């Protein structure tokens, strides 16, 4: 499959992937994503009083949407993130002494990988790929 431009086709460019992750408890979501993983809270939205929260968190170019809305995402999902500095990130997380998560780094055929699981059973796999290595999600 070629990524080359075809003069007969319009130019298509994807700007960012933004996974939506289902949450059930706003306090636990902030504790995990902001306090533990070190993301910043970019914005929050509710359609009205007594509606679920929808928010965006980000860190170093990674943007995640966290949603309490039924139907936005399935609990127990898996997000694969290609990154640089996975060992430094793991050391940062371990130094926080977070009682619910002590992630390690695995050496896999495609690179180094650290997996975390949020309080809602969603997993994020942070992977620093070897040059030319393809990852198995």
Image (cartoon, grey):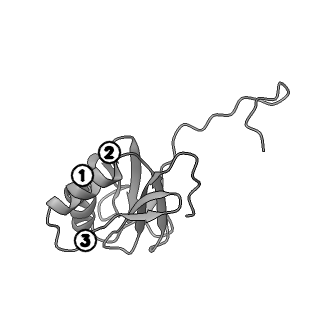
Disc on the earlier residue, 2 or 3: 2
Tag 3 or tag 1, which sits nearer the N-term? 1
* Viewer-side residue, 62 vs 87: 87
Residue 59 numbered mark, or none? 2
Q: Is residue 10 above or below residue 105?
A: above
> In terms of secondary structure, where does tag 2 sit?
strand
Kindly give the residue lying farthest to the right in the view shown.
Answer: 8
Secondary element at image label 1 = loop
Q: Position of residue 43 (x, y in %)?
A: 31, 45
Give the residue at mark 3.
Answer: 101
Residue drawn at x 21%, y 65% is 27
Q: Characterize the local packing of mark 1: few (<14), some (14-19) or many (20 or more) Cα atoms within 10 angstroms.
A: some
Say how many tags the image has.
Answer: 3
Q: x, y (%) of residue 92?
A: 21, 54
Q: Which of the image's four quarters has the C terminus?
A: bottom right
Dots 2 and 1: beta carbons under 8 Å?
yes
Measured in 3D between alpha carbons, the distance from the residue under mark 2 to the one under mark 1, in whole angstroms, is: 7 Å
In which image quadrant can residue 105 be found?
bottom left
Q: How far apart are the alpha carbons under marks 2 and 3?
A: 19 Å
The residue pinned by badge 1 equals 38
Image quadrant assignment for residue 52 = bottom left
């Amino acid at each position: 499959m070629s990524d080359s431009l075809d003069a007969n086709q319009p130019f298509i460019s994807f700007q960012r992937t933004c996974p939506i992750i289902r949450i059930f408890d706003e306090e636990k979501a902030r504790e995990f994503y902001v306090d533990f993983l070190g993301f910043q809270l970019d914005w929050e939205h509710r359609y009205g009083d007594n509606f679920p929260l929808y928010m965006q968190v980000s860190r170093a170019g990674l943007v995640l949407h966290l949603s309490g809305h039924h139907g936005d995402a399935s609990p127990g999902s898996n997000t694969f993130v290609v990154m640089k500095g996975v060992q430094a990130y793991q050391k940062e997380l371990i130094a926080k002494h977070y009682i619910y998560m002590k992630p390690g780094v695995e050496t896999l055929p495609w690179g180094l990988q650290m997996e975390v699981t949020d309080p809602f059973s969603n997993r994020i796999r942070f992977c620093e790929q070897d040059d030319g290595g393809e990852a198995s999600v």
